[in-house]
Image (cartoon, rainbow, N blue to C red):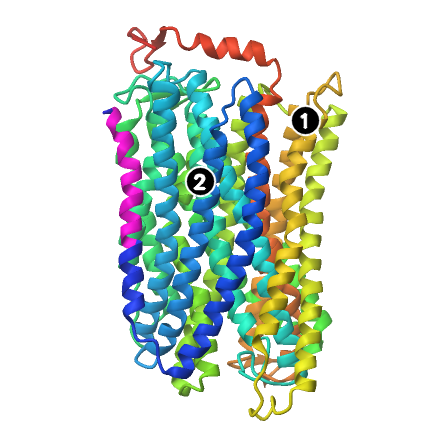
Amino acid sequence: MENIIYLVPLFGVVALLYTALQSAWVSKQAAGDERMTTIARYIAEGAMAFLKAEYKVLAGFVALASVGLFYLGYTGENSHPLVVASFVIGAVFSALAGFIGMRIATKANVRTAEAAKTSLSQALKVSFTGGAVMGMGVAGLAVLGVGSLFIVFYWLFVKSTGAAVTGLEMERALEVLTGFSLGAESIALFARVGGGIYTKAADVGADLVGKVEAGIPEDDPRNPATIADNVGDNVGDVAGMGADLFGSYVATILAAMVLGSEMKVIDEFNGLSPILLPMMVAGVGAIFSMVGMLFVRVKEGGNVQGALNIGNWASIVLTAVAAYFLIMWMLPPNLQLRGYDFTNLGVFWAVFIGLIVGALMSLITEYYCSMGKAPVNSIIQQSSTGAATNIIAGLAVGMKSTTMPIIVLAAGIVGAYSVAGLYGVAMAAAGMMATTGMQLAIDAFGPIADNAGGIAEMSHLPKEVRERTDILDAAGNTTAAIGKGFAIASAALTSLALFAAFVGLAGISAIDIYKAPVLAGLLVGAMIPFIFSALAISAVGKAAMDMVKEVRRQFREIKGIMDGTGQPEYDRCVEISTKAAIREMMLPGAIAIITPLVVGFGFKGVFPDASSAEILGGLLAGVTVSGVLMAMFQSNAGGAWDNAKKSFEKGVDIDGKTYFKGSEPHKASVTGDTVGDPFKDTSGPSMNILIKLMSIVSLIIAPHIAVDGAKRHAEVEKQKAPVEVVVKANPTQKVKGS
């Protein structure tokens, strides 16, 4: 039964074949007239130009980081230089995930606009299929990458040496595999921050000068920043989000595998079942995500959000059912991790809890960010007295929106721990992330629909076409907010699981905040999300200033723009966003990677009563708590501001009077939305990558800063010898195992 290990990469291959078939279908759809294809080409060329520039910089980072990892792997007692190969493959796969999403999104946008000439149903089919390519591409690459590399490292370190599954050789294999996650999360952070800076610089410039000063629509072809704005939707919300969830997916699987490796079991899989289970759950989740996509259908005038929800719930329910049979088959009835006893049924309930937490987080986020709901309506009402009260209302909504998600997360963590210990918390995260393919398909469809609306506007298509794309876009705004909430929740659970794995590898039993250095680490960790957010937001502000100046210059100097006889210089705006994003993404990214290294190695042996591992543990605790709250607050506030602004397009009632676009309350809402843009699309979504990346870097260096490393080495080596294992279902029965 050990050969089940080869089934994992097969799941990934199936997902990638589905991705290829769906991509081919999208490419075959009609792309519209010459004007539509010209605009789409501008967007595609701008998007690819950014990726090319970004990947050049990231290639240098990967090369530099590889040197450091090789040194650690070569000199560390429990490390291996192969961590470099794992790191590079993870970085390449993460970049490839973003590239796949970008390519299909820039094809699907114009085809969605063309399909909207026919019906809402066909437009949804094209845009959602484009999102499905992104979602299943990420899921397929993640499962294929983790599964294939695990097979290689398992044979190299464990099987070929005859070592025990619970011994140091398996620990070394998983530490090398951690490099894959580090590569994925490193690229994800830069892609998310860089993409967020790009898209919001363009968006703010287009809004402030085009809509507020010039009084022209957002996607008017006379606005020089409009192409850069459309490019930014793909750069930030497709490529950035794809790399983000790819990193989350991999980190979640890995954290559960590391904790599973500490469990000594007697099973039909040579003791591998707790390690293989997270990969198997991810694999079946990818398959049932594809099944759920079949349920996303809508009739003309139907509820798009409802259709997406049906597909999402179908994938969740099917994955939960499959997980039950998988867990009952693979895991023995009685298990133990770090002194905590639990059952295989408890592990299933932990996975189920993870799925429910993910679903509840989506519903709560939808409530706080959707048009027509009380939070968004409160912002609309306070727009009547100006931009200041609009901003105050949005900040309040964002802060309130942290309450229920945190309670749900806390309940999920306690529930998962009570039924299956720390392994249960890790498997809850794995359960939540199992349907990543579906979640990302729903999320990526939004930017495609948004771009389709822009192309329809700039191509002067019939009014009913824009009405259909607006219906898709409205649903897309909500799904984008929901996707961010899902990513944040997964990051919180994943970071806790990674934290537990770090504690084990570092040889510490607790984080004692009575120790002054540990408390100092906790406070510094809580501060990091604030400085990280400040850098990201200020980067958007500086880039937006450059964009505003450029748009004003073109309106002033290029004759005929406003009457449609002059041609704006779109490429200048694209260039400004690209350079700003590449320049400004470096410092926030460096903070996430360098800080754990400085604390872990810099304070080694400095304090007699507190090890550097304990101080680093305090830092991670502070980053995780502060980062999760900041992410929820910023993402939800930005989403609510955005939909408050969009509500004016259909008309809103304030004190018995109806206000539309162009009214003073609408202008106030535009200002609020502009403030919220970097919240929801730059700093907020980057928080979840920040906390995961810092945890993964800490996990990588844990063996190098471990407390009493020699003693721990000897204790783990003892596990290679045969021991008596008591099967609790029958206390009188003893089974020999190794």
Query: Where 523 sits versus 534, above or below?
Result: above
Q: Which residue is mark 2?
A: 89
Front-most of residues 112 and 543? 543
Please name the predominant secondary structure of the magenta segment in the image: helix
Looking at the picture, how far across and down is residue 389, in whole percent? 71, 70
The answer to which quarter of the image holds residue 708 is top right
Instruction: Name which residue type carries label 1.
Output: Phe
Badge 2, how many Cα within 10 Å: few under 14, some, many 20+?
some
Q: Is residue 574 magenta-colored?
A: no
- Chain part drawn in magenta: 2-18
Find numbered disc 1 in the image and state the secondary structure of the residue it sits on. Answer: helix
Residue occupying the point 43% across, 80% down: 456
Quarter of the N terminus within the rendering = top left
The mark closer to the camera, 2 or 1, is: 2
Q: Which residue is mark 1?
A: 601
Looking at the picture, how far across and down is residue 503, in whole percent? 56, 25
- Residue 685 in sight from this viewpoint: no
